[in-house]
Amino acid sequence: MTRDRFLRFGSAAGYGLGLAAVVIIVAAQNGLGYDVHAYWLAGRHILDGSPLYAVEPLTTFGAFRYPPLFAQLAAPFALLPEPAFSWLWRGVCVVSLRYLAGSWLAMGFWLLVPLTLTELSSANVTFPVAAMTLLALRGNATLLPVAAILKFGPALALPYVWIVMRSARRGLLTGLGALALAVAGSVLLAPGAWRDYVDSLAYGADYALNDRDLLRILPNALPDFALRFALGAALVATAIGYRSDRLVYVATVVTAPVLWVSRLMPLFVVPRLPGARFRD
């Protein structure tokens, strides 16, 4: 078998697994997903005027841990039935995955990894956030602030882009300004929701990370995230010195607030990033 045939066969096998996953999701879950359920429910809460946040474990089904702005933007789409909302968001995840993979052929190989299918099934913001981060490292940092407010880890890339990638500064400032205006409008519309959101950030202080699919250094969620964020900041400082896109990208991925094993899938991008770049 020639190399090209092998690559096509391997990629086709990945798409076959992806199709099988779609069938299973439809048959077993009615098209719904674990994380995307929380997004749809948050949008419904905005429409119904219900509280967005509750004192409950981080892994409670339907628990929403993102800023109110995300729920407000999801609200119009939450008018759709939940299955339609779920597949619409999965479509965003698939487009993001295609960008991360670099080609449709390469995307097939990503689909051979079960953790990719896990992420697409649950439909978290993992792939969209990683795609926005990769886009920033390729020179368009307009959406990087959005990635930062969703997952916190991409915030570590902000000083790297500003210091190392001077040509991307204008886009970064545009993104920061647009996000600041959006957040200001969101706060004016729902100041109580933002107070509840800030309070909810402390929920993880005493929450024990016991799930076998979670990667952690410390036993409780908030201290574990704080330590990983500090280590990520140190990694970014090193990345600035070496001008290494790889190091800063890794830092943004591993500092997810709660690090499930499947959240590491965006690291497949790392070999395609420059280990060091010329001065911008």
Image (tube, rainbow, N blue to C red):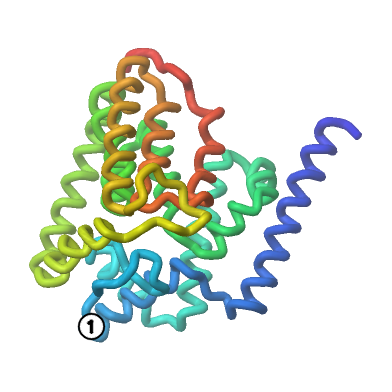
Give x and y (percent) for residue 161.
Answer: 29, 29
Asked whether 252 or 199 is in front, the reply is: 199
Which quadrant would residue 248 be assigned to in this image? Answer: top left
Give x and y (percent) for residue 171.
Answer: 26, 37
User: Is the N terminus in the top left, top right, bottom left or bottom right quadrant?
Assistant: top right
Which residue lies at the image location 32% right of the left edge and 32% below the top edge? 231
Which residue lies at the image location 44% right of the left edge and 58% below the top edge? 210
- Compared to 70, does 110 lie above or below? above
What is the three-letter code of the residue carrying label 1? Ser
Q: Which residue corresponds to mark 1?
A: 50
Q: Is residue 189 visible?
A: no
Asked whether 48 or 203 is in front, the reply is: 203
Which residue lies at the image location 53% right of the left edge and 75% below the top edge? 32
- Compared to 204, does 193 lie above or below? below
Asked whether 159 or 209 is in front, the reply is: 209
Give x and y (percent) for residue 263.
Answer: 48, 49
Give x and y (percent) for residue 167.
Answer: 28, 25
Which quadrant would residue 138 be assigned to in this image? Answer: top left
User: Is the C terminus in the top left, top right, bottom left or bottom right quadrant?
Assistant: top left
Q: Is residue 36 visible?
A: yes
Task: Give SS at disc 1.
Answer: loop
Residue projecting furthest to the right: 1
The local crowd at label 1, few if under 14, some if 14 to 19, many if 20 or more residues have their Cα within 10 Å, is few
Image side of residue 202 versus residue 62, left or right: left
